[in-house]
Image: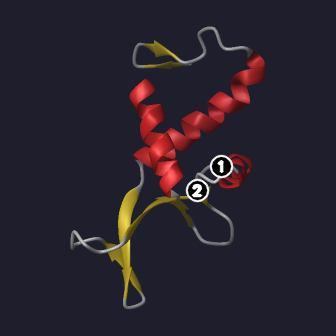
């Protein structure tokens, strides 16, 4: 698989394919996410720098991958909600992965 000029499958054992798919899905989730704040019972984009926020993305990905990422403690994607939220550990790991690419 080529992204730009980077061959992501170069030297990858096929047994590692599922792990690479999980990493790519995780990076895509992060790249398409946004920050929201929660105040007075409403969800909205953060507007004040001191408001508590969380990073959210839509759950339009393979549910098996979402379950693995939830089990790994990187996102919260359980339940019937249409969106998933990133944990602090998940945000840090996504940023690390994106620096490697």
Outermost residue toward the top? Answer: 11
Which residue position holds label 1? 69
Residue that appears at 37% across and 91% down: 40
Which residue position holds label 2? 75
Residue that appears at 75% across and 17% down: 14
Residue 84: x percent and y percent? 55, 62
Number of numbered labels in the structure image: 2
Residue 44: x percent and y percent? 34, 76
Please determine whether, in this image, residue 92 is positioned above or below residue 34. Answer: above
Q: Which mark is residue 82?
A: none
Q: CA distance from mark 2 to mark 1?
A: 6 Å
Describe the element under mark 2 as helix, strand or loop.
Answer: strand
Outermost residue toward the right? Answer: 15
Q: The N terminus is located in which quarter?
A: top right
Direction from residue 62 to residue 59 in the image, left or right: left
Relative depth, front residue between 62 and 94:
94
Query: In which quarter of the view is residue 73 placed?
Result: bottom right
Relative depth, front residue between 82 and 43:
43
Describe the element under mark 1 as helix, strand or loop.
Answer: helix
**Residue 101 appears anywhere in the view:** no
Residue that appears at 64% across and 33% down: 21
Compare marks 2 and 1 and give the one earlier in the sequence. Answer: 1
Outermost residue toward the bottom? Answer: 40
The reply to whether the C-beta atoms of the residues labelled 2 and 1 are less than 8 Å apart is: yes
Residue 60: x percent and y percent? 58, 54
Direction from residue 42 to residue 58 in the image, left or right: right
Relative depth, front residue between 92 and 43:
92
């Amino acid at each position: 698989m080529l992204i730009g000029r980077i061959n992501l499958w170069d030297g990858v054992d096929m047994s590692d394919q599922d792990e690479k798919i999980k990493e790519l899905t995780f990076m895509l989730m992060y790249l398409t996410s946004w920050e929201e704040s929660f105040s007075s019972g409403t969800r909205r984009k953060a507007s004040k720098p001191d408001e508590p926020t969380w990073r959210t993305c839509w759950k339009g990905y393979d549910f098996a991958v979402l379950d693995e990422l939830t089990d790994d403690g990187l996102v919260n994607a359980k339940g019937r909600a249409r969106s998933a939220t990133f944990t602090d550990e998940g945000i840090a790991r996504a940023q690390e992965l994106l620096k490697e690419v």
